[in-house]
């Protein structure tokens, strides 16, 4: 089956919380053993960071960990980073906008290029490049808008670009609960050799806006 793109990070958090609170934690212990203890807040925050998607904020973390404060969330991020440094992990938690993301340390980022290759090595189809261009210039943009620009369904292409780390899924601030938007990633900027989206060539339609 093709990979499915999640609805929104918020939906993912609510689903995760429901599984933890209602279905219970899976355990290898016998059925008559004492109930399993839920993981500590630190590990749940780490799990949320591993899930990826849009940057994890304290507000989003609270949807899974009710009662956690901004300071406690910040302390958890600092503690995880300290653990990663002490253990010599190839990744770290970095701030991105108002939230935090789990990313590779600079000395290991070449591994991603070797694994996925550059734009040419990835051999994106023309249709995928068309979708990437639409997202780059119109972000954040929802799938129906991408479909409208192309005159064809773009679901599979959007999922392909997400898997390659060129675009990411983010919630629409003024959309329906299950609507999502797509935007480019830092990897997109790196591969195209630009510092920010402001460095993209201006097009005629955007100049008229």
Image (cartoon, rainbow, N blue to C red):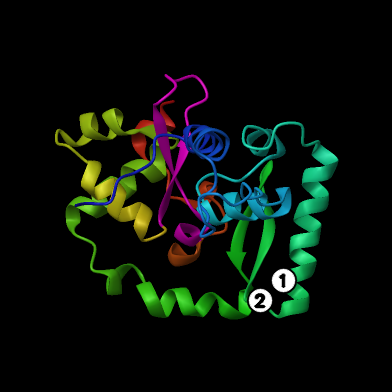
Q: Horizontal and vertical percent for residue 190?
A: 50, 65
Looking at the image, the residue that sits furthest to the left is 152
Q: Which mark is residue 84?
A: 1
Q: Observer-nearest residue: 68 or 166?
A: 68
Find out whether residue 117 is within the magenta segment.
no
Q: Write down the region rendered in magenta.
A: 166-189
Residue at (47% x, 32% y) in the render: 11
Residue 77 appears in which quarter of the rendering? bottom right
Residue drawn at (50%, 47%) of the image: 53
Who is closer to the viewer here, 33 or 179? 33
Q: Residue at x 54, y 37 (%)?
A: 13
Other residues around mark 2 within 10 Å, as few (<14) / some (14–19) / many (≥20): few
Residue that mark 2 sits on: 89
Relative horizontal placement of residue 20, taking residue 178 as reference (left or right): right
Using the image as rendered, state which of residue 36 and residue 59 is in the foreground.
36
The answer to whether 80 appears left or right of 192 in the picture is right
**Percent position (x, y) of residue 28?**
51, 60
Q: Is residue 208 above or below residue 132?
A: above
> What is the secondary structure assignment of the residue under circle 1?
helix
Q: Residue at x 77, y 37 (%)?
A: 68
């Amino acid at each position: 089956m093709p990979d499915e793109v999640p609805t929104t990070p918020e939906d993912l958090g609510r689903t995760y919380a429901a599984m933890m609170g209602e279905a219970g934690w899976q355990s290898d212990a016998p059925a008559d053993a004492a109930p399993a203890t839920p993981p500590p807040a630190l590990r749940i925050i780490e799990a949320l960071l591993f899930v990826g998607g849009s940057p994890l904020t304290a507000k989003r973390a609270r949807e899974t960990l009710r009662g956690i404060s901004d300071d406690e969330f910040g302390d958890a991020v600092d503690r995880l980073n300290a653990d990663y440094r002490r253990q010599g992990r190839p990744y770290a938690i970095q701030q991105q906008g108002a939230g935090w993301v789990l990313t590779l340390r600079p000395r290991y980022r070449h591994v991603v290029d070797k694994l996925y290759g550059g734009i040419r090595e990835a051999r994106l189809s023309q249709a995928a490049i068309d979708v990437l261009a639409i997202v780059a210039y119109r972000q954040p943009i929802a799938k129906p808008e991408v479909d409208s620009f192309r005159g064809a369904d773009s679901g599979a292409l959007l999922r392909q670009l997400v898997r390659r780390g060129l675009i990411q899924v983010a919630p629409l601030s003024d959309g329906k609960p299950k609507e999502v938007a797509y935007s480019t990633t830092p990897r997109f900027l790196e591969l195209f050799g630009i510092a920010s989206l402001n460095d993209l060539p201006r097009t005629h339609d955007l100049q008229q806006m």
